[in-house]
Image: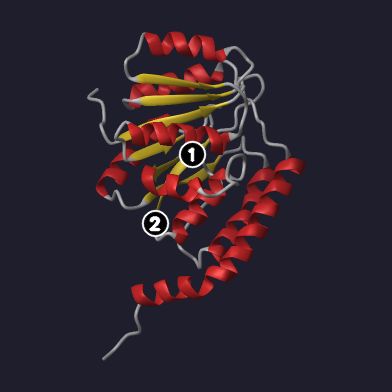
């Protein structure tokens, strides 16, 4: 497989145990290069991932000394990617939920239209917790309002291709977006910058504990974080509303005969 010089796969990982190895192998079977950012994991996976990277030129590993959150790990990888000359990064979780086999099609969609963000639209099966499926509809509703219906099909699904420079610019002067709030706030703020979404269907698989599934989502803590995030975004949305409406009017002028 010829390495891409513009697009890479970026996998943030925190205490997912052996599942991360299967995720990385599946990603490497589909794309070159793949970068992994170990976000202060204490499960010993960094050691084996180092061995994997030493034996595979298409795999690069970053190990952060302490857990800082998904968004912080992604930002670390994005900055390194920019410095290495990459323009786009496909993010995927290390817990086995995301479909590695769709990496090539998502990358091709991004290569064809590099100015957009290519977003996964989750297709749930019977393994999906009903509470989480219903709960994300609330977040999606707020996101639709905050972006004036920009077309973001799902605000929480982290299997996506981002334009690197645009996302770094969004995060550079933003103190938030470092933990579970990253996925939603990233697409809202990119939409505010005029980055259009392209949505592609992608299945989601929730692994059971017997299958090695690990979830760091905490309903109380993380729903409070999301509520605070949407409150902040709504306040800023109201301040941005005139400029957003002006941009929308310029893109869709009234019909003239």
Does residue 132 sit above or below 234 in this rendering?
A: above
Name the quadrant containing residue 140: bottom right
Can you identify the residue that label 2 sits on?
A: 195
The Cα–Cα distance between marks 2 and 1, rounded to whole angstroms, is 24 Å
Disc 1: CA contacts within 10 A as few (<14), some (14-19) or many (>=20): some
Q: Residue furthest right?
A: 220
* SS for callout 1: strand
In the visual, does 15 lie left or right of 189? right
Where is residue 197? Give x, y as percent: 41, 55
Where is residue 220? Give x, y as percent: 77, 43
Q: Earlier in the sequence, mark 2 or mark 1?
A: 2
Name the quadrant containing residue 42: top right
Task: Tell me, for residue 181, which label it has, or none.
Answer: none
Where is residue 174? Give x, y as percent: 55, 49
Disc 2: CA contacts within 10 A as few (<14), some (14-19) or many (>=20): some
For residue 119, say whether it is visible: no
Can you identify the residue that label 1 sits on?
A: 203
Looking at the rendered image, the disc whose residue lies closer to the viewer, 2 or 1, is 2
Does residue 68 sit above or below 157 in this rendering?
A: above
In the visual, does 93 lie left or right of 207? left
Does residue 249 sit above or below 227 in this rendering?
A: below
Relative depth, front residue between 218 and 242:
242
Circle 2/circle 1 CB separation < 8 Å: no
* SS for callout 2: loop
Quarter of the image for the C terminus: give it. bottom left
Q: Residue at x 25, y 32 (%)?
A: 5
Q: Residue at x 25, y 47 (%)?
A: 112
Name the quadrant containing residue 82: top left
So how many labels did they put on this image? 2
Q: Residue at x 29, y 89 (%)?
A: 256
Relative depth, front residue between 63 and 173:
173
- How are the residues colored? secondary structure
């Amino acid at each position: 497989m010829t390495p891409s010089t513009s697009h890479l796969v970026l996998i943030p990982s925190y205490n997912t145990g052996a599942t991360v190895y299967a995720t990385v192998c599946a990603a490497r079977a589909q794309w070159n290069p793949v970068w992994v950012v170990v976000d202060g994991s204490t499960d010993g996976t960094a050691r084996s991932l180092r061995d994997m990277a030493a034996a595979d030129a298409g795999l690069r590993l970053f190990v952060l000394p302490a857990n800082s959150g998904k968004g912080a790990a992604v930002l670390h990888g994005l900055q390194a990617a920019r410095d290495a000359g990459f323009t786009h990064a496909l993010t995927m979780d290390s817990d086995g939920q995301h479909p590695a086999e769709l990496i090539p099609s998502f990358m091709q969609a991004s290569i064809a239209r590099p100015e957009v963000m290519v977003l996964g639209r989750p297709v749930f099966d019977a393994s999906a917790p009903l509470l989480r499926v219903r709960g994300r509809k609330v977040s999606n509703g707020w996101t639709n309002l905050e972006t004036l219906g920009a077309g973001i099909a799902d605000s929480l699904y982290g299997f996506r291709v981002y334009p690197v420079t645009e996302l770094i610019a969004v995060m550079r002067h933003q103190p938030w977006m470092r933990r579970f709030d990253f996925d939603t706030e990233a697409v809202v703020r990119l939409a505010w910058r005029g980055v259009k979404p392209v949505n592609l269907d992608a299945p989601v698989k929730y692994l059971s504990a017997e299958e090695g599934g690990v979830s760091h989502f905490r309903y109380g803590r993380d729903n409070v974080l999301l509520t605070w995030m949407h409150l902040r975004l709504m306040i800023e949305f109201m301040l941005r509303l005139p400029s957003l409406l002006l941009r929308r009017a310029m893109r869709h002028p009234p019909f003239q005969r």
